[in-house]
Each structure stands twice: as structure tokens, then as C-alpha cells.
Image (cartoon, helix red, strand yellow):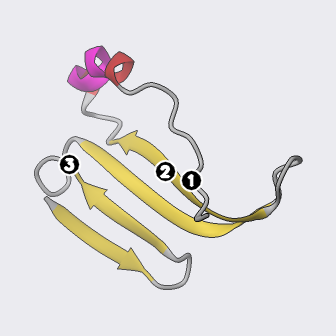
Amino acid sequence: MDAELDDYGSSIEVELWEKGKGFHLCLLYDFIDLRQEPGYYLAPGLSRHYEDDFLDKYYHLFELLCYYKKS
């Protein structure tokens, strides 16, 4: 797996396959103004390269990703 830290957006991009192919896990740590409890959260996201349409059948394995707050 290949990972890259983006200092400007304070996020970590992790390629979960070969470089330039497959799923990407994005971990963003930022201030998020949620209605119940605003604060700094780790917001995970999942993306893929558009041309990797063979991955469509695997999306159901990843339920909704939640925000995480340090307690």
C-alpha cells in the first residue's frame, strides 16, 4: 500500500491496491460543525479510480463510514 500525507488539507491518502489503481482511503482530520457536537473529527472516505469499474461489486462491503472524535 502507498500512502501520502497532504499537509495543506491535513489528510492522509492511502492507496489500497497498486499505485494508481483500486480503492483509496482518505483520512481527513479537520474541524467539522456537526449540529450535535462541533469539533475536530477524523472523517474517513473511500474512493476509486473511475476506470476501475470492476470494483463496483465490492462497494456493498463498505458500510457508511462514520466520523470519529477523540474523547
Locate residue 22 relative to residue 35 in the image: left or right.
left
Q: On the image, which quarter does residue 2 sit in?
A: bottom left
Locate residue 66 relative to residue 19 in the image: left or right.
right
Mark 2 residue element: strand
Residue tagged by mark 1? 68
Label whose residue precedes the other's in the sequence (2 or 3): 3
Label whose residue precedes the other's in the sequence (1 or 3): 3
> In the rendered view, would you say 13 is above or below 54?
below
Which residue is located at x 48 percent, y 50 percent?
44
Q: CA distance from mark 1 to mark 3?
A: 21 Å
Residue tagged by mark 3? 16
> What numbered label is drawn on residue 7?
none
Pointers 2 and 1 in contact (C-beta within 8 Å):
yes
Which residue is located at x 20 percent, y 48 percent?
16
Residue tagged by mark 2? 44
Q: Residues within 10 Å of mark 3 (few under 14, many from 20)?
A: some
Q: Residues within 10 Å of mark 1 (few under 14, many from 20)?
A: few
Q: Is residue 56 magenta?
A: yes
Q: Nearer the viewer, mark 2 or mark 1?
A: 1
> In the rendered view, would you say 53 is above or below 44?
above
Q: Nearer the viewer, mark 2 or mark 3?
A: 2
Magenta segment boundaries in residue numbering: 54-58
Viewer-nearest residue: 14 or 34: 34
